[in-house]
Amino acid sequence: MDNSPLAVLEMDDQLRVLRCSRRAIELMGWQDLVQVECRRLHELPGTAAMEQHLSQAFSDLRSGRTTRNRVESCVRRADGSEVHCEWFNSALTDAGGRVTSIMSLVQDISSKIEIARQQHYLANHDSLTGLQNRSAFHSRFEHSLS
């Protein structure tokens, strides 16, 4: 687990953390492994207000509606900083098909999100004045009409 460049979390079917990598502790801004193990994911610092689509992704896995999924979320660390994450989740099942645990690989995509924000800004604002450009005007106009 600790050799992975991604953060690795293994949780039971109730989302209690069974194991996690050092990278997960660093990425989420947790203090140490003792703070994390055997606690439910939503009880941990930064994940208490898990976004609805992340909660739904875990619910889909736990219910058996899907065996794997991918979802993006934002985690607020204890120091107040935000980290944007891409979660790759897989349900691990027993021979009878019952979900026994969930494995999550988590990647920090904060720089990707920042680049996308910058591109969006540049696409909708004049580079000299910083004012919204014609494209932004048309987009807002169409939104207002609808």
Image (cartoon, rainbow, N blue to C red):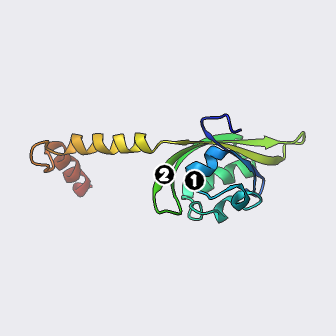
**Disc 1 versus disc 2: distance between alpha carbons?**
8 Å
Label 2 CA crowd tier, 10 Å (few <14, some 14–19, many 20+):
many
Tag 2 secondary structure = strand
**Comes first in the chain, label 1 or label 2:** 1
Amino acid found under the numbered disc labelled 2: Val
Q: Position of residue 133 (x, y in %)?
A: 14, 45
Q: Which corner quadrant holds the C terminus?
A: bottom left
Q: Tell me the residue at 56%/49% (across/down).
A: 27
Q: How many marks?
A: 2
**Left or right: 112 in relation to 64:** left
Residue farthest to the left, as pictured: 129
- Of residue 83 and residue 58, the one placed in the foreground of this image is 83
Instruction: Residue 67: give its label.
Output: none
Marks 1,2: beta carbons within 8 A = yes
Q: Quadrant of residue 134?
A: top left
Q: Position of residue 139 (x, y in %)?
A: 22, 47
Q: Residue at x 73, y 62 (%)?
A: 39
Residue 83 visible in image = yes
* Amino acid marked by disc 1: Met
Please give the residue where the numbered disc 2 appears in the rendered image.
83
Alpha-carbon neighbours of circle 1 within 10 Å: few (<14), some, or many (≥20)? many
Percent x, y of residue 4: 65, 35
Return the residue at label 1.
28
Point out residue 83 in the picture as x, y percentages from the top left corner. Answer: 48, 51
